[in-house]
Image (cartoon, rainbow, N blue to C red):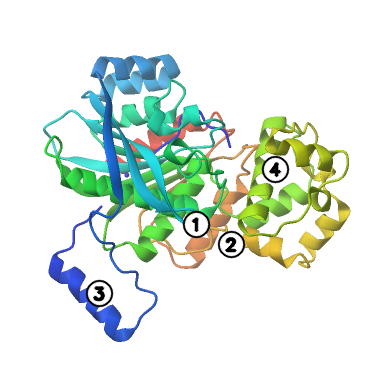
């Protein structure tokens, strides 16, 4: 889910409180309580990349979008310093690896809140946030939010930056969440051991497209497993594919756009789940010929210029619809992140004409969360918005949302 500029992000508990939590957990043998990680166990290295002036940030925003130009001229208040962070996390197989991300620190003597921005789909390592390439979100969106006075964490995810030798687990809920959370833990360690910026210990999270899905996944993980580590104030999720089961059913059973770049992403999801969940089906199981042979050879590099459902075998579609392919059905369901009850104030932004990540993803999430009793969730539809045209309304809405929860 290609995005050109996406968006958006800990609380200290006393040593006594942490000790009490761990003690009670041990006494009660409560497996649902996750122990607080040992401090100093995530950050591997931090390297300053550069310094960017306030004027340069404004110019970059001005070159991007007329609305952002006006916004930047009105609200940008400082320059930023940029860093590349490497940290420890775990791959999808549980093996410990070194991952990376960008850290952007405002040049200011004012205490600053932290935003974790989960990036949208990228197609090359040059776009990874920690590389600060001209076409990366960190170089545009990240520096903009830093120049608004926020500390900005920008995880690369597994498969980019320091972990580029591993395949990216595209739209995989668990690893997107854990890589983003471990990046935040590393940033927390970095901030504790420096004096150039004071962090007010508030955390905000946001992202668009794959970043919206990653943000929702991160929010759920923080609330359920790491609430004692972070003072999470708000979450802004844009155009994410939260209801994977409904999304897959739509793509498999109905006529869609036939846009090659979009179909590549649907294919990427299928191949990723087949790999991570060790389903191990041959391409001929999923795809008709000549598509099976081409996909077997080229993978996501193969261009599909017709409705995605027309390249799928009838037997696969039947097994998905009647549930007999339990391995694939369960893999898809394991990546749903819409049917839970958030505690944090949450906004779901989505263009109601989005042809790539269908609008029903946010509608289904909103309805499911409200049904479970969530009181701080808002659905913000963008009338007539497509996947691309809804980015700027999402960014501006997110800034206002976060500023209102200070």
> Is residue 53 shown above or below 236?
above
Residue at the spot 45% in from the left edge and 32% down from the top edge = 128
> Any mark on residue 174, and which?
1
Locate the N terminus by quadrant.
top right
Q: For mark 3, give the secondary structure.
A: helix
Q: Secondary structure at mark 4?
A: helix
Quarter of the image for residue 226 reads bottom left
C-alpha span from label 4 to label 3: 43 Å
Tell which circle, 1 or 3, labels the residue nearer the N-terminal end. Answer: 3
Pointers 3 and 2 in contact (C-beta within 8 Å):
no
Query: Residue 22 has which mark?
Result: 3
Check contact, mark 2 vs mark 1: CB within 8 A. Answer: yes
Circle nearer the N terminus (4, 3): 3
Left or right of residue 84, residue 274 in this image: right
- Tell me how far mark 2 sits from mark 1, CA to CA: 9 Å
Please tell me how crowded label 4 is: few (under 14), some (14-19), or many (20+) other residues with Cα within 10 Å: some
Q: Residue 172: where, in percent of width, then height?
A: 55, 52
**Residue 238 shows up from this direction:** no
Q: Is residue 14 left or right of residue 255?
A: left
Q: Which residue is mark 2?
A: 334
Percent x, y for residue 269? 64, 47
Alpha carbon separation for disc pair 1 and 3: 24 Å
Residue at image position (18%, 62%) is 13
User: Residue 109: in sight, yes or no?
Assistant: yes
The residue indicated by pointer 4 is 267
**249 or 314, which is in the foreground?**
314
Quadrant for the C terminus in the image: top left
């Amino acid at each position: 889910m290609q995005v050109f500029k996406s968006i958006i992000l800990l609380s200290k508990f006393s040593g006594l409180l942490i000790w009490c939590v761990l003690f009670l957990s041990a006494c009660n043998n409560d497996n649902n309580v996750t122990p607080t990680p040992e401090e100093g166990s995530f950050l591997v290295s931090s390297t300053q990349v550069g310094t960017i002036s306030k004027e340069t940030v404004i110019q970059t925003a001005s070159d991007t979008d007329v609305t952002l130009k006006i916004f930047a001229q009105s609200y940008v208040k400082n320059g930023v310093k940029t860093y590349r962070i490497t940290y420890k996390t775990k791959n999808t197989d549980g093996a410990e690896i070194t991952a990376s991300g960008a850290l952007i620190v405002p040049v200011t003597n004012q205490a600053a809140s932290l935003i974790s921005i989960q990036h949208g789909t990228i197609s090359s390592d040059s776009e990874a946030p920690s590389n600060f390439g001209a076409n990366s979100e960190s170089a545009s969106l990240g520096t903009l939010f830093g120049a608004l006075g926020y500390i900005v964490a920008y995880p690369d995810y597994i498969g980019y930056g320091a972990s580029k030798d591993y395949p990216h687990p595209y739209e995989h809920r668990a690893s997107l969440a854990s890589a983003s959370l471990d990046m935040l833990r590393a940033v927390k360690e970095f901030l504790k051991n420096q004096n150039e910026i004071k962090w007010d210990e508030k955390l905000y999270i946001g992202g668009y497209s794959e970043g919206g899905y990653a943000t929702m996944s991160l929010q759920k993980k923080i609330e359920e497993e790491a609430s004692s580590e972070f003072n999470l104030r708000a979450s802004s999720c844009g155009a994410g594919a939260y209801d994977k089961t409904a999304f897959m059913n739509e793509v498999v059973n109905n006529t869609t756009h036939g846009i090659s770049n979009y179909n590549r992403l649907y294919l990427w999801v299928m191949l990723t789940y087949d790999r991570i969940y060790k389903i191990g089906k041959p391409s001929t199981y999923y795809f008709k010929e000549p598509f099976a042979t081409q996909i077997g050879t080229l993978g996501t590099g193969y261009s599909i210029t017709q409705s995605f459902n027309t390249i799928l075998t009838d037997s696969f579609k039947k097994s998905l619809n009647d549930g007999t392919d339990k391995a694939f059905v369960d893999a898809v369901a394991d990546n749903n992140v819409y049917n839970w009850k958030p505690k944090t104030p949450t906004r779901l932004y989505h263009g109601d004409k989005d042809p790539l990540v269908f609008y029903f993803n946010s509608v289904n999430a909103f309805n499911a969360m409200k049904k479970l009793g969530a009181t701080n969730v808002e659905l913000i539809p963008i009338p007539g918005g497509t996947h691309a045209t809804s980015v700027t309304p999402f960014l501006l809405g997110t800034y206002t949302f976060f500023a209102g929860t200070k």
